[in-house]
Image (cartoon, rainbow, N blue to C red):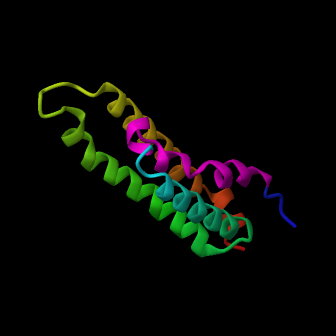
Amino acid sequence: MTNKRFLLPIILLQFIPIILFPLKTLQSGIAVIGGVILLFALLGYGLWRGRKWGLYMSIFIQGLNIIIRMMMFFPHAVSKQGIWDFTYMLITIVSMLLSGWFLLRLECPDVQSVVAI
């Protein structure tokens, strides 16, 4: 049996870039956060069991997160009053970088060979 321990950080932490939003935004969507964590628990189970759907859906969601964050960046970076929201910009950039790292890591041959048994 192959060693899957290197998958644990991916399995346990890949939901973080998706729920990374400013605190005022997160307070209004506690139920959504629970749903996201439940979805990623299911995806983590699929990755651990070596299911291709878990790998493909994880890659899809991380890529979609990058695209959505790019589309939301400029409209939300500056308020209607012309005030720059540096907290939002920093959190969005960190989220895109984390999603990019997870995306690249999920595409590595070692992860692909373990998951797609």
For the point 19% across and 32% down, the residue is: 78
Q: Where is residue 76 in the image (x, y as percent from the top left)?
A: 23, 39
Q: Where is residue 75 in the image (x, y as percent from the top left)?
A: 19, 42
For the point 61% across and 74% down, the residue is: 52
The answer to whether residue 98 is visible is: yes
Say which quarter of the image contains residue 43. bottom right
Q: Nearer the viewer, residue 21 or 112?
A: 21
Q: Which of 66 and 25 is in front in this view?
A: 25
Q: Position of residue 8 (x, y in %)?
A: 73, 52
The residue at the far left in this view is 81
For the point 58% across and 74% down, the residue is: 53
Q: In this view, does 4 lie to the left or right of 87?
A: right
Q: Magenta segment range?
A: 5-26
Q: Is residue 13 left or right of residue 19?
A: right
For the point 18% across and 25% down, the residue is: 83
Q: Nearer the viewer, residue 23 or 52?
A: 23
Answer whether residue 108 is magenta in the image: no
Q: In this view, does 45 lie to the left or right of 27?
A: right
**Magenta: main secondary structure:** helix
Answer whether residue 21 is magenta in the image: yes
Q: Position of residue 81 (x, y in %)?
A: 12, 28
